[in-house]
Amino acid sequence: MQIIKFDNVSLAPKDSQGFHGLDWTVETGECWAVVGPNNSGKSMLTAAVKGRIRPLGGRLFCPDRKCIEQISINAVSSLIRGQGVFYQSRWNSIMDDETMGVEAYLSAKSVPAADVLTDIAPVARMLEIDPLLSKRMNQLSNGELKKVVLAGVLVNAPELIIYESPFAGLDQVYRPKMDHILSWVTRQTPCIIVETHPDALPSCITHRIELDRFQVKYCGPHDPVQHVPGRPITAAVRAASPTTPVPGTPPTVITGKSNPGKIDTGPAPSQTESPVLVDMKQVRVTYGRQVILEDICWTIREKEHWALTGPNGSGKTTLLGLIAGDHPQAYANDITLFGIPRGSGESIWDIKARIGLVSPELHLYFPKDIPLFEVVCSGFFDSLGCFKTCSAPQLATASNLISSMGLIPEKDRLFGALSPGIQRLGLIARALVKEPLLLLLDEPCQNLDPENTRMILEMITRQVNRSSATLVYVTHVPQEIPDIVSKHLALDKGPPLIS
């Protein structure tokens, strides 16, 4: 039985390129992957399946849009913003009572049916999210949020699931589990997997359609022998394991339950070492009784370049939030930034002026009704939107950066109308545009294809070398860590409760 059928379909929104004469059929029992680089047409194709784009010609048959669930950065962003949550609310516990809890979210998504998928308990166990049920949605890490959103999709019992980049944002340990989960899910519900990395396809895929510049390059059976599930390969690779320090790195101390949160990043510095940009002493972060970080001591010096790794929920993004000035518990800890102790009357904007930031959270919460060029220009002012007038040199710098990233055709399009990969490129440009003293890049290459990943890693390296900036690079994919990185800090989950 046919689930989806494109018969000589033309798709061409007014502000974009499009497809012409597209033929594609999805039958019951098939699991398709839509594969292609950024801006190849993947988002447009799935938007047509979801009913958000009407064909200009041809015939299109799909399930009712109300019976289709989509997991993507834009869908998750709409979910979070629909709850009235703002960017820094993850760090502000005062908002907890006003934000939906995970269990309440799943209960609201669940539909009454005689199907095990609609029962929250077995789904939570399968996805290993039982410890998250008592949390609020805005307290979840990027990887945790993806698991909860998938649980919400499953208990909603849709007729079709569209899942974009299912392994992105998940740690190396959980990825094989996700591959197993997807194999089970696709036996119950038809799925379409959307992926920029051809080598990151789950093992459940039976067919694939490959796109490039809105042209179909291949459409047919998938050969799983040629692909390793859940293992994205970039063109700028280094063989490493998730917990193996990059070359030249001193021994790494990994926090964990057996060693509750203590990090010592090395011996005391000598008199000749570079100035200290970040100095954390016995930092502790808690949400209620839950300990996120415990007894963290970390010193970052000028021109040092760090990799920060760890499983989902280990506190990586929280640690960056303390540095970037977004986390209020910075004032309750012994933290010195750029030589100024936090809580000593310093301006948060003076701190942000020296930092360039990219993170999954920023991507989720960034306003969608702003042209891409203004998104990039907002980096000069550290605002979520460009509310000041840029100088002529600033406009020239932003234009040159956008041009070097191949984004000129997209610069006037609204951020929300762009594909997730192009959105991420825009946010990276926003972080780089002012040539900050400290770059905090939290999974910057998420949603990027191998070619754009290579371009971004090379661009980061050039800018850091040219401007003598300091880099902190967070990733679950050790192969994409830039070659300039020589220090490594690996986190693990600390004690879950305060006794």
Image (tube, helix red, strand yellow):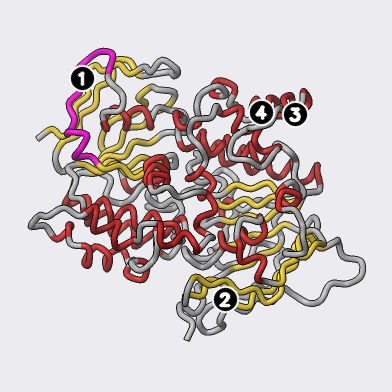
**x then y, percent, for residue 373:** 61, 27
Question: Hey, which residue is sitting farthest bottom in the picture?
Answer: 499
Q: Amino acid at mark 3?
A: Gln
Q: Amino acid at mark 2?
A: Thr
| Mark 3 vs mark 1: in front | 3
Q: Quadrant of the N terminus?
A: top left
Residue 238 sits above or below residue 212 on the image: below
The CA span between labels 1 and 2 is 55 Å
**Mark 2 or 3, nearer chain start:** 2
| Mark 3 vs mark 4: in front | 3
Q: Start and end of the magenta stretch?
A: 55-68
Residue with the mark numbered 3:
394
Residue at the spot 50% in from the left edge and 46% down from the top edge: 446
Determine which of the numbered discs, if any, sits on residue 404 in the image. Answer: 4
Residue at the spot 82% in from the left edge and 62% down from the top edge: 339
The CA span between labels 4 and 2 is 40 Å
**x then y, percent, for residue 421:** 49, 37
The CA span between labels 1 and 4 is 38 Å
> Mark 2 falls on what kind of element?
loop
Residue 220 sits above or below residue 492 on the image: above
Residue with the mark numbered 2:
255
**x then y, percent, for residue 68:** 23, 39
Is residue 150 among the parts visible in the rendering? yes
